[in-house]
Image: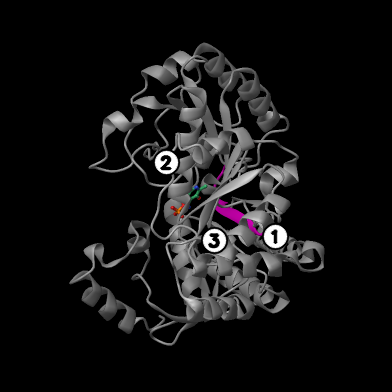
Amino acid sequence: MKHVEKSRQKYTESQAYLAGGVASSLRSAMKPTPLFAASGTGPRITDVDGNTYIDYLFAYGPLILGHAHEATTESVHAAMKRGVTFGLQHEGEIELARRLTEILPCADKVALSGSGTEAVMLALRLARAFTGKRKIVRFHGHYHGWSDAIFTAFPSSDMRQSSSAAATQEQRLLPGTSGQSELALEDIILLPWNDSAVLEATLREYKDDIAAVISEPVMCNSGCVLPKSGYLEHMQDLTQELNMVMILDEVITGFRLGLSGAHGKFGLEPDLITIGKALGGGVAISAVAGRKDIMALIENGTVSHLGTLNGNCVATSAALATIAELSKEDGTIYHEMENNATHLVEGIRSLLAKHGIPGIVNHVGPVFHMMFTHEPAVEDFASFTKRDGAKYADFAGKMLEEGVLVRSNGLWYLSATHGAQEIEETLKAVDRALVNL
Ligand code: PMP
């Protein structure tokens, strides 16, 4: 067993002062104990007990350039020396906003915030103000942050997905947490994703009430499921026809599937997108980007967009340095990440076959979801919920013993620093961890 005594002690100590002992609720679930990090370099992270792991949890996604990336770190140091934040405008904001409008096909203008949750809040507000309507369509298995307005519990596997607009209206939405105003969810319509017929029926039936449809372009939060051919295009056509705002939540996919995000990769024209995570390479920053006439509501004062630390110098310099690095040699870094991820995914699939363990690995760019399941495919939320989560958590525990840190829900992130060496070591670890699972 790995020695994690110091982490255990620190967790006990932290519980005395920090509510729950962690700074974000998900982190307390880690077994055998929430680990305390001491440092990270490239693809590896070291805990306070001195154990080093190949990291695929990767801070839940932002560290696309790896831990302690030199150029990003230097640029942040330099920004801090000039002054962290001013509450005045500074040139870094213009530079970043200009760069984002160059890179992101849908971006006429951008607005900067601190987290994905805030970016989604702003996008929903813009959509309601722009259309003068209230309801928001969102999908089972997608995650859009933890604000009252959108945070719903993931239904359990036995909760049937509604398959008609009427059933959807009757279903009671479960708040994501106690303490959340249930009224806040009154305006949410929750639909199964990847089902064009249900989408069309619902949007047509409630066309006078629906302000926006918000969707992850790839269902990364539940199985890394790709959109069915034509599905997002259909969503785009319907929202255009029915005067609704199409919001693609690219907090995971933005700067991860490519510089132009999933909408660029798939050739889509959403009205608004939200980005975060990889944008700042680990520093807190997010943005809403989109159509001039919608973003104009911020310019003319119709929609408030606030935040003391919005666009601070550390965040903009981290984002600019990250983008500069990702843009080098026409973005070849993405080909390398994708090749490495493909190599790893194919290796894991063969190992599952070798050990006779039924499982699926859904993969898009440098992110993939590994699931133990008897389903022939995971193509929607219903099939995703049939995976054996407990078995995967055991596997994650065994991987930790092998020196590989993976998230206990099955989502793996690669960075530009995961190379052949890490992948070979990881596959050996998977081979051992699958024995007697
Ligand atoms: N949208 C998506 C698609 C996400 O995956 C997340 C975070 N996992 C968020 C929004 C919320 O971002 P944050 O945690 O930065 O508030």
Place of residue 20 in the rendered image (x, y in percent of width and height, measured from the top left): 24, 63
Horizontally, residue 75 falls left or right of residue 164, namely right
Of the pair 137 and 95, the residue shown nearer to us = 95
Of the pair 146 and 220, the residue shown nearer to us = 146
Horizontally, residue 188 falls left or right of residue 376, namely left
- Which residue is the site of mark 2? 304
User: Where does the magenta region start and end?
Assistant: 366-374
- Can the viewer see residue 377 in this picture? yes
Badge 2 density bin: few <14, some 14–19, many ≥20, Cα 10 Å = few
Image quarter of residue 417: bottom right
Residue 294 drawn above or below residue 59 = above
Q: Amino acid at mark 1?
A: Ser
Q: CB atoms at circles 2 and 3 under 8 Å apart?
A: no
- Which residue is the site of mark 1? 350
Indicate if the residue with disc 3 has its beta carbon within 8 Å of ligand 1: yes
Place of residue 342 in the rendered image (x, y in percent of width and height, measured from the top left): 73, 60
Q: Which residue ends up furthest to the right in the rendered image? A: 329
